[in-house]
Amino acid sequence: MKVTVGKGSCGIAAGAGEIFSLLEQESASPIVTGCIGMCYLEPIVNVIGDDGKMQIFVNVDETAAREILKLSRGETNEADKYAIKKEDLDALDSQHRIALVNCGIIDPENIDEYIARQGYEAAKKCITQLSPDQVIDVIKVSGLSGRGGAGFPTWFKWKAAKDARPGPDGKKYVICNADEGDPGAFMDRAVIEGDPHALIEGMMIAARAIGSDEGVVYVRAEYPLAITRLEHALTQAREKGMLGKNIFGSNFSFDMRIKAGAGAFVCGEETALIASLEGERGMPRLKPPFPAQKGFWQKPSNINNVETYANVPWILREGGEAFSALGTENSKGTKVFALTGKIAKGGLIEIPMGKTIKDVVYGVGGGIKGGKAFKAVQMGGPSGGCIPAALEDTMIDYKTLGATGAIMGSGGMVVMDETTCMVDMARFFLDFTCKESCGKCTHCRIGNRRMLEVLERICAGDGKEGDVELLSDLAVQVKEASLCGLGQTSPNPVLTTIRYFREEYDDHILRKKCTAKSCKPLLTFTINDKCIGCTLCKKKCPSDCITGKVKEKHEIVQADCVKCGKCKEVCKFDAVSVD
């Protein structure tokens, strides 16, 4: 019998480190695993019997950990009340895991556990049995597209890099973009933390396909645990002969290194990433030439993200047809999403393409937290768009999502409920984009800033007629005149909220009201007849705008109210109304 503890970043944040230490002190010899995806249930502890049967315990605290210890020792068991609920287990079982197949299952710091689950078999097959063209053909049959956002066919990028003429030194590069910067996205981080060898093997296969002997993983420095585990995995792979010279006794040699990036969102664009790798400021470059022809150090380079590479070993083991059988005609395979926001069951999920937004929000995500009404979902991060609840039957694939004005993106899915102001949501994402713009393009640098100023004015109650038309005009200009994908897609949150939630803009501008009761400058706080005169709101008011005597109904002097909401927050009798 063995005990495992989920020690991904989410688990550690929830207290898994303390649980692991407790189990270790009690000589339970716990084993580390990554995140299994159910972040809302962390810390998670698994007990695996000698027969392979696994029991999952969730939200584990010290009391639960001690009961789990008794279970692992065969003593009287009172741990059942901490076991995972059937509906949560059903949500996990309803997924189809390929990129995440080992996450939360194996010890990411033990290469032998990866090898025991067919690890590196695909790489060995590619290196010893298949030609580069045959490897690319398998990827072509699979229909795998880039999971970093654009959805470009992976096989086409690989073939372009393979066919590109290298310099006199014959150098080509395989690069992994692990610089996910979307707010609410953590797919790549979780894969590296939970299954780093899948990334290594995927890059090995890509290197075999294009004729490269060197790989670089560009990962943001804000992912220290991912970097540590990947470094450890690289060391183990070298010790096992999986990396280095003459791998598997062949004439193929390949090694990898890590580059910790500074966390610039624009470095998710491949030419900006290359500039950063070369020690320059991360700014996009004109294309063509494309990286496949002239990339890192002007040498042919292939760039994919973590999830894309993590799918490759499975595809080479199971066959391109097996992957292609999943998904839709236009979007093959599965997709990993980071489900966040006002969702009941937030975390990582992996589903076949073709599922609907409703399937995800209600089927896997358990619906809206607190029983509130589903309002919209933001897909594609700052480059994506807001899809309203009225379109919840929208199928999740590249073409269908694109028709809504949103994009698949890297897989961020932020769920919003009735308390979310869509005008403020557009402001939030545009504020992020303005801060992350490299400033190279005038329209992106200044146009987005002007749009943000208009949105800030609207949210502050100072909007005026014509602002929506001004936003739409500026958005089109920014999209058409920006060099890279950051500027070309940055207006999407604004355009989609105008398209689907125009009435909220009109409420803000014409009626000076925020129907979601989110924009505080547009709210009016009043004290109703439930007030018993306890004076708590009066004592806590920072602007001293509440009047009234003890045991008498109080009043708010509107001219002095700063809309902080403190009175509503502290009132125990629901005596403060907000309009």
Image: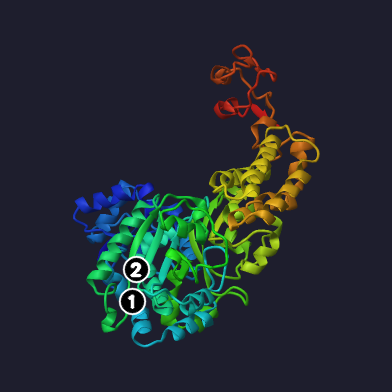
- Residue 356 rendering spot, x and y as whole percentages: 62, 65
- Look at 71% across and 32% down and name the residue there: 461
Q: Which residue is at a point 70% across and 32% down the rendered structure image?
A: 522
Q: Position of residue 293 (x, y in %)?
A: 50, 71
From the viewer's side, name the closer residue of 34 and 176. 176
Side of 505 relative to 169 (left or right): right
Residue 395's label in the rendered image is none
All told, the count of numbered labels is 2
Comparing 59 with 399, the one in front is 399
Q: Residue 115: in sight, yes or no?
A: yes
Relative to 135, say whether 506 is above or below.
Answer: above
Give percent across and percent down for residue 156: 54, 76
Give the residue pinned by disc 1: 120
Counting residues from the N terminus, which is met first, the one under dot 1 or under dot 2? 1
Q: Which disc number belongs to residue 197?
A: 2
Asked whether disc 1 touches disc 2, contact meaning CB atoms under 8 Å apart, the reply is: yes
34 left or right of 463 in image = left
Going by the numbered disc 2, the residue's amino acid type is His
Q: Position of residue 11 (x, y in %)?
A: 37, 52
**Residue 231 figure quarter:** bottom left
Residue beneath the point at 35% across and 52% down? 224
Q: Regarding mark 1 in the picture, which secondary structure is present there?
A: loop
